[in-house]
Amino acid sequence: MVGKDCVAIACDLRLGMQALTVSNNFPKIFNYAPSTYLGLTGLATDVATVSDLLRYKVNMYRLREERNIAPQTLANLVSSTLYEKRFGPFFVSPVLGGINQTTGKPFICGFDSIGCIDFAKDFIVSGTASEQLFGTCEGLWEPDLSPEDLFETISQALLSAVDRDALSGWGAQVYIIEKDKVTQRLLKGRQD
Amino acid sequence: MTSFGRYTSAETVGYSFSQPTSAPNKEHSFYPYTDNGGSTLGISGSDFAILAGDTRSVAGYNINSRYVPKVFKIGGDDESGDGAHILLSVVGFAADGQALKERLDAVVKMYKYQHGKPMSVRACAQRLSTILYQKRFFPYYVHAILAGLDEEGKGALYSYDPVGSYEREQCRAAGSAASLIMPFLDNQVNFKNQYIPGSGEGHALEPKKAEPLPRETVEQLVRDAFTSAVERHIEVGDGLQMMVITKSGIEEIYSPLKKD
Amino acid sequence: MEHFPEAWGRPRNDIYGPYDHSYLQTTGPKAHTQSPAVTGTSVIGVKFNGGVAIASDNLASYGSLARFTDVKRLRVFGDSAIVGFGGDVSDMQHIDRLLNSIDIRENYSSDGNLLNAKNLHTYLSKVFYKRRSEFNPLWNHILVAGFDGDGKPFLSSADLLGTTFSAPHLATGFGAHLAIPILRRLFPEDTPLENISKEQAVEALRECIKVLWYRDARSLDKFSIATVTKDGIEVKEDEKVEAQSWAFAETIRGYGAQVN
């Protein structure tokens, strides 16, 4: 979710096999540069594989380039990585959020499982509660939110949405990304 | 003559005109339902209830019409619905919705003629459940919401599944965009996940109590819910029909929505 | 010598096995229409100042075969209503018989036929809904044109499921895809009816029929067109698509005269 000079990215903490909850502490957001984060929903084994594969690719990028990867660059890296598996895809739909350190501008985008990028100016949602998230985000979000307001908005949107999805919930994790500060918060949420 | 013994019973001879046969029952390929899309939403207040629905009717990717109402007055004196004191919204299969509306309307009218008093919303709610359940094995493919004022004059809202399970609620969204609207309503009407700032630390934090909202707030919430749904759901749009029931009667408000 | 005459001329059971009677079954499930057989394609209609215009071509297809090329699919009812039929032609003739008997009954009644197009549409949609509820549908999609109880132009649709809807311009079948966009461009939906003349409406329908003839493979260049106004009904049943231009086909591979 985009705010004024800030970006927020949030996820729930549940891991399940259909209706069976396997873990209630399974964060789905991964950090790839000081102000660049990637959320991965979908098949847990692919979440782990893709996040590790990208970790490797981003590390190689950083060694070669001797600088951090920009969110836009990571977006293209994610896209091409997913499209490599066009006919046997990773079952993930990533969400990327970050601030470009060169321009200082917020950047968010989402992907389908084969790497089609969805650039958005407002918010990106993904996962089993995506319909609910579309509703809450479309209803609560407004342009140019301050970091504090953005935190409140994304938290309310996420918690209310996952409460209406049987397959999501068990608390949440929220990152508020500003140009030179990242705040991570844990939300308790409903534990059922 | 050798063949004589073979044809002693009708079973082997086979009269074509009386032969009982047991062909397997053929599957009916006719599907008697269609989804006409759209969404409805109801919210009750302390002395009013609002039922709203978009006015688009679809069949697949086709728009049938931009104005097909989903909210109806029940038990009115004539076609205009004047004198009605109950509202019904139906979303799903429009032909079933129409049939259900007409049946409930007739029931409420008959009640008035036979008992000499208008049917209470509570009784009407129970009756609607019965009507739906009577067709348990060939259901009315609709999500119904019934609204009115209860015996104390408070807003009353009942929501149903297609086979008649029902419940009185503060608010309910139904139809194709229900999953988008409902969590928004949880948050904004029942204040779910909202806490009173500074009321305590951690678990001691006090949840914000849900209280009946004033009419202006509710109307604005309904508009916001629908403009949001229109953005993200292709079956919702064209127009918003809102019916507000208060002790002074029923008010109908129509406002345009995006037509794309 | 075979002594049983019912076995004469039949495949011998001892050689070919017991005779299979299943195709002659007299018991078992009752057969209903599972799919239409001889069908009509689009019907298109548009309201104008003081009335309604409606048109359809004169073709009845049997699958991809243009089986009957002189079938009138617009039916006049009383002196102020027209029904246009798409879908199964035998079901159309069945409904036509229903309408005839109603018309006769109404005309024998003391105050003449007072059924307007709106009443007719309500009746037909209930016939459709009843038949679909019996899993024995009448496989049609119809438009009803005429006047409502207040004397305002009326145009509404009903289909085999009993779904009904109304709009300033309507079309069934392929017309919903090809004709509606043309009509909507000519007469935007917020255009007051006063700004649409009868001549404009008729000309628009002729144009739509032409486009359907160009692009709908199950259509015909012979068509019927009718208008209902306060002065009565005007029907022309032997119209021909005029001023055809197939220039567009030249540029389309496989449509025009290209060799490769």
Image: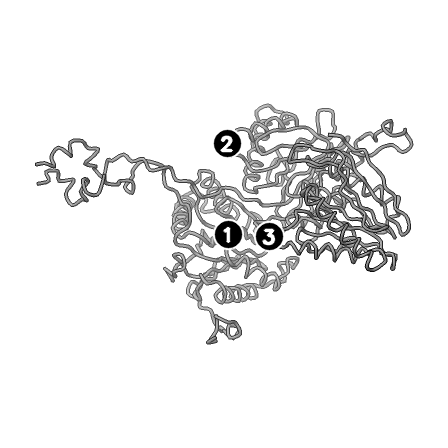
Q: Quadrant of residue B106?
A: top right
Kindly state the secondary structure of the residue where label 1 is placed.
Answer: strand
Mark 1 closeness class: few <14, some 14–19, many ≥20 residues within 10 Å: many
Q: Position of residue C132 (x, y in %)?
A: 46, 41
- The label shown at residue C144 is 1
Residue occupying the point 27% across, 41% down: C24
Q: Is residue A125 above or below residue C199?
A: above
Q: CA distance from mark 2 to mark 3?
A: 30 Å
Q: CA distance from mark 1 to mark 3?
A: 19 Å
Q: Position of residue B1 (x, y in %)?
A: 8, 36
Q: Quadrant of residue C191?
A: bottom right
Mark 2 closeness class: few <14, some 14–19, many ≥20 residues within 10 Å: few
Residue occupying the point 60% across, 62% down: C196
- The label shown at residue A29 is none
Label 2–label 3 contact, CB within 8 A = no
Q: Chain of mark 2?
A: B
Amino acid at pointer 2 = Phe
Q: Nearer the viewer, mark 1 or mark 3?
A: 3
Residue identified by numbered label 2: B137
Residue occupying the point 81% across, 59% down: A64
Q: Position of residue C186 (x, y in %)?
A: 61, 64
Residue identified by numbered label 3: B63
Q: CA distance from mark 2 to mark 1?
A: 33 Å
Sequence-first disc among 2 and 3: 3
Q: Give the left or right position of residue C191, taking residue B218 as reference.
A: left
Amino acid at pointer 3 = Ile
Q: Chain of mark 3?
A: B
Amino acid at pointer 1 = Val
